[in-house]
Amino acid sequence: MLESVTDHPWPAAEKDLKQKMALIESYFAATNGFLDLYSRAELLALLPQTNNALDAPNERTAALYIAIAIGGQCRASGPLDLQYSREYFSLGQQAAFLGMVEDPSLTLTRCFILMAFYMLGACRRNAAFMYLGIAAKSAYAIGLHVTEHYASTEEDERSAHASTWRSLRVMDITLSALLGRLSGTLPNVAEPETFDSSVMESMSLHQVYQDAMYGAAIIMDDIFHGLLRTKSIDTVRAEEYLHKLNVWSASLPADLRKFSRTTPLLQSDQELVLGKIHVAGLYYWTVMLVTRPFLFFTMTLSSKQASIPASYNQQALAEITTMSQVCVSAAIYFAQMCQQALEPGSLLNNMCMLKGWTYSAGLVLGFSMVVSDHVRYDVEEAFASAREVLQKLSSSSPQSEHYYDVLSRLADAIAKYRQRRASESRQKHPELVTELLTFESGANTSTVDLLGSQTQPKSPSALAGNIQQLDASHGFGNASTAHTTSNPIGSHSVPGHSGHMMDPTGVPTYENLHGARMDFDTGDADGSWEAFAMQLSQTFPFDSGLEQLFQDV
């Protein structure tokens, strides 16, 4: 864990105060868009009540302690930052559990939301999920979900209640979707549809970004529950979901859609750009969430030798291909955005949500490189950018380091796959040209898969099944879920043809596809990949929803 660092002496009072103020600024930058729980004035007013982490924690200072801890965790510029992070989180956590948990309150709700954010940065997603559950119960107990109660409160109190509820909803929906789990909060009666420019003029910076995130999160929640209900998706519903996202994006303020770089980057500029990255990242990830099942299916048809009966509905195949291209485009946009943010140093050293989104985008880009025989340089560059971002974040996050390692091994596997395809292409006309001289080495030439085991080549269809298990932590599929009997592409079914079936392990099998093979998984694929997936989290069921692409009707 990140907390395992060597203690250093606490600085003198003056330096301690400056350190805390700097970490509070990092807190606001790291949480911009996700949280709007306290203003700067509220937190800074509490600073005199702290003294080098020696004061006994209480209800008033608990939130400040956790905010300082988040700032140190996310900035992570040295051992002192991590020491502040560890010590102040321990104090804030102690205050939250001493007696606050027995009495639901606005302060308790806020503290557990803050602790959930910290736990995400500490690579403890289950703890974050549990803390958000406590925050949700507290919010319901004091009526934050009932907007009618706000009318009888003062403006400041009403604003605090509304911003806390929105922060809880954004965190709960985003984390639950990332983990493939049901959220702990339900939609409110009144959800934002568009941005009111007259109201926005009086909103704080964090309120503007959180309003944008809240609108996207509400759409994501609707999509997520729709996918869980049907356990499948068709092109018509995918287009409906994407249309909702486009309506939301069209209503965004123009300032949220662009950023002018400055050198050197100011602290205030970092807060601005991170808020915009969070908003855009949530949008791109939701697009990938909707369209990635179609990318899975196109992977199974990527082989030149794959024979598709002429009677199959070509329009349906074209629409599915379009959706898979949309998925890749979203991943490219996301990776390019993050890489551009690296250049001026806009990113913090530990960003809890960004690392998961980047990993998902990297997997989409990596596997899309297997689908096509044509090299797309924008995909290649975006895949490299995703790995570069994770490498930067890995300096302070073991989880990011793990993600970077997986994508690096995937890059090696893709390179070997392409080399083999190129070699096979050169050998198509042996009667005209042959390889006259070869050099052999005594080293073992067997290949190594992503899990480090020697393996024989696997087919692209088996690879697609392993992708579903590999990316289970990000809500993109569960290869072991029960099969659905609904038609995943609706009106695009073709009479007289049965679709590809699912084998007992949940991995698609395509007996009529005999394409190129790729070294990727182990001989005991089911056991090893399932064990790997279990290290991550629970999963979605709907990525298996295309197993009956062409049903009898």
Image: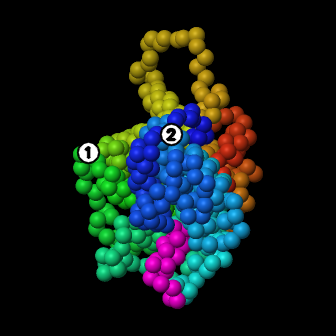
Q: Tell me what residue is drawn at x 57 percent, y 48 percent.
A: 54
Q: Residues within 10 Å of mark 2 (few under 14, many from 20)?
A: few
Q: Viewer-proximal residue, 37 or 327? A: 37
Q: Disc 2 vs disc 1: Cβ atoms closer than 8 Å?
A: no
Q: Main secondary structure of the magenta part?
A: helix
> In the rendering, at what x and y percent does residue 344 appear?
30, 44
Residue 530 is one of the magenta-drawn residues:
no
The vertical placement of 25 against 192, above or below, is above
Q: Which mark is residue 10?
A: 2
Q: Which residues are magenta?
A: 151-169
Q: Tell me what residue is drawn at x 64 percent, y 58 percent.
A: 95
Quadrant location of the C terminus in the rendered image: bottom right
Residue farthest to the right?
Answer: 504
Amino acid tagged 1: Pro
Q: Which mark is residue 202?
A: none
Q: Viewer-proximal residue, 449 or 401? A: 401
Quadrant location of the N terminus in the rendered image: top right
> In the rendering, at what x and y percent does residue 270 appear?
34, 52
Q: Secondary structure at mark 1?
A: loop
Amino acid tagged 2: Trp
The vertical placement of 149 against 344, above or below, is below
Image position of 71 (left or right of 466):
left
Q: Tell me what residue is drawn at x 55 percent, y 48 percent.
A: 53
Q: Tell me what residue is drawn at x 65 percent, y 55 percent.
A: 94
Q: Which mark is residue 264?
A: 1
Image position of 260 (left or right of 303):
left
The vertical placement of 79 against 62, above or below, is above
Q: Is residue 457 visible?
A: no
Residue 165 is one of the magenta-drawn residues:
yes
Q: Quadrant of residue 248?
A: bottom left
In front: label 2 or label 1: 2
